Image: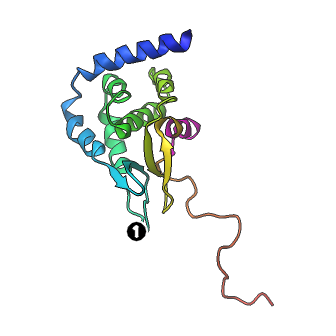
Amino acid sequence: MKPIIAAVCFALICTAQCFCAYEKKLTHVLEQLRECTLTLTEELPLVGGPAVGAAATPHEFYLLFPYVSTVATDEDLRAMLCDKSAVVRIMGAKCILQKKDSVLRDAVDLLAKDSTKVYVAPFGCGILRQSVGEVVAELKKDSDFLGDPKEPYQTSEPTAPSGRDSA
């Protein structure tokens, strides 16, 4: 019964929030996020990290995160969780989970069942097809997911010969 009540409350909150305007400082940035798509087998929203593709280019999601996390109010973040754009919903969740004392942390749990598919490029050439709920689960495990890697380019074994003779 509790999940049904939570879902109904979330729907009511989202409906109310969708009629609210975002802070003017966020309007253009959120539109940029809504335009983030990629076509592989199908066109889907794309969420990317600090180095996407062979050129290792920082993705818009990664570049816009510091601004959104600084400017967005709690009301904006609540509204972002029910935005029509999966990328905006994920950005809202990441902003909330990055804040250690956010009162909105529980609201992020309501995205756990969001089955909307997105492409996710956390780092490098690998692009995953995941649901919003799966991305949020990754963010809950590691709030730096889709951010700067803690130890980039490190492996446990050498990846190429050093060019020196071992004898």
Name the residue that disc number 1 marks: 55
- Is residue 124 placed above or below 167 in the rendered structure? above
Q: Residue 140 occupies which quadrant of the picture?
A: top right
Q: Nearer the viewer, residue 84 or 55?
A: 84
Q: In the drawing, does residue 46 fall left or right of residue 144?
A: left
Which residue is the extreme one toward the front? 41
Q: Report x, y in % for residue 86.
A: 38, 37
Q: Nearer the viewer, residue 118 or 74?
A: 118
Q: Is residue 31 magenta?
A: no
Which residue is the extreme one toward the left? 24
Q: Residue at the location (50% across, 40% down)?
A: 135
Q: Is residue 144 magenta?
A: yes
Which residues make up the magenta segment?
Answer: 135-145
- Is residue 73 placed above or below 162 in the rendered structure? above
Q: Residue at the location (46% across, 22% down)?
A: 107
Locate the N terminus by quadrant: top right
Q: Tag 1: residue type? A: Ala
Q: Residue at the location (41% across, 57% down)?
A: 40
Q: Report x, y in % for residue 92.
A: 39, 33
Q: Residue at the location (49% across, 10% down)?
A: 5
Q: Secondary structure at mark 1?
A: loop
- Mark 1 crowdedness (10 Å alpha carbons): few <14, some 14-19, many ≥20: few
Q: Report x, y in % for residue 50.
A: 43, 55
